[in-house]
Image (spheres, helix red, strand yellow):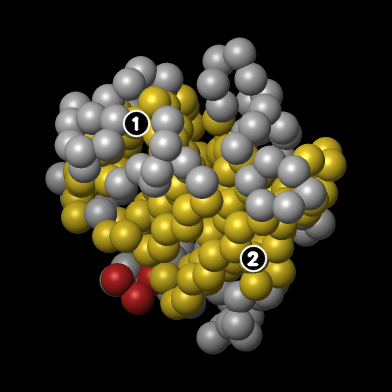
Amino acid sequence: PNLAAAYDTADRTSTAYVTASISFVAGRTYLLGIRGRVSSGAPSIGSVTGGGNTWTLVQTVNAANVSIWLYRCIAATTTSGAISITPDGITTWTQAGWIVDEFAGARHSQNSIVQSATAVQTASHTTLVVTLAAFKSGANAAYGFFAHNEDTALTAGSGFTDLGAAAEPTENANRMKSIWKSGEDLSVDITSAATASDVFGIAVEVTAEGVAIDATSKSG
């Protein structure tokens, strides 16, 4: 499920953006998608901590003054706690957004993510596709985290299910989006209204542990 999705428009350089408290279940896989923006240049992350877990960077992609990242963790214990996302202390972020999703039935090891890929579109577009290689198993799941650089709604591609969504309070609620699909799908995609604003995506293959895999969002 989705456990958390939120946006913070405060300027921060070395102090953390903090999520709401999240309930972690031992052995489950958690994916944290982050969107950061600066006035110029590219934002960088100093650290991601919280919940007593080790957060590992899966992928990142940047265009102009916006970057997105995807982190993962395997919950060490069943506990609750917030996640802190701290900029690098050098560049001042002007906003941050995040989505936290939970996978039950994923492999209980750092091999829970088989592969990852990224895509970015800076020209006029109505869709963004992140292409994955052939899956290791048809029982695995496809997951995507996407973000737009303007107030334009993102819509999950055919066959995919929405998990989390977030935006600035005055903007379309689907400016950031996470989606998933049980089974192989090599084209993890979203659509939007026609725009020339940058759009970013990260996709992964999540490994099933021999049982039905399920995803939920933990946003807040």
- x 46%, y 25%: residue: 7
Give left or right: position of 41 versus 46: right
Residue tagged by mark 2? 130
Q: Is residue 27 visible?
A: no
Mark pair 1, 2: CA separation? 26 Å
Q: Kindly state the secondary structure of the residue where label 1 is placed.
A: strand
Q: Secondary structure at mark 2?
A: strand
Taking the spot 42% from the left edge, 71% from the top edge, the residue there is 113
User: Residue 193 location in percent, x, y?
Assistant: 83, 39
In the drawing, what numbered circle is on residue 93? Answer: 1
Question: Which amino acid does the dot numbered 2 rest on?
Answer: Val
Depth check: 9 or 112 in front?
Answer: 9
- The residue sitting at 41% across, 52% down in the picture is 69
Which quarter of the picture shows residue 172?
top right
The amino acid marked with disc number 1 is Trp
Q: Residue furthest front?
A: 40
Disc number lying in front (1 or 2): 1
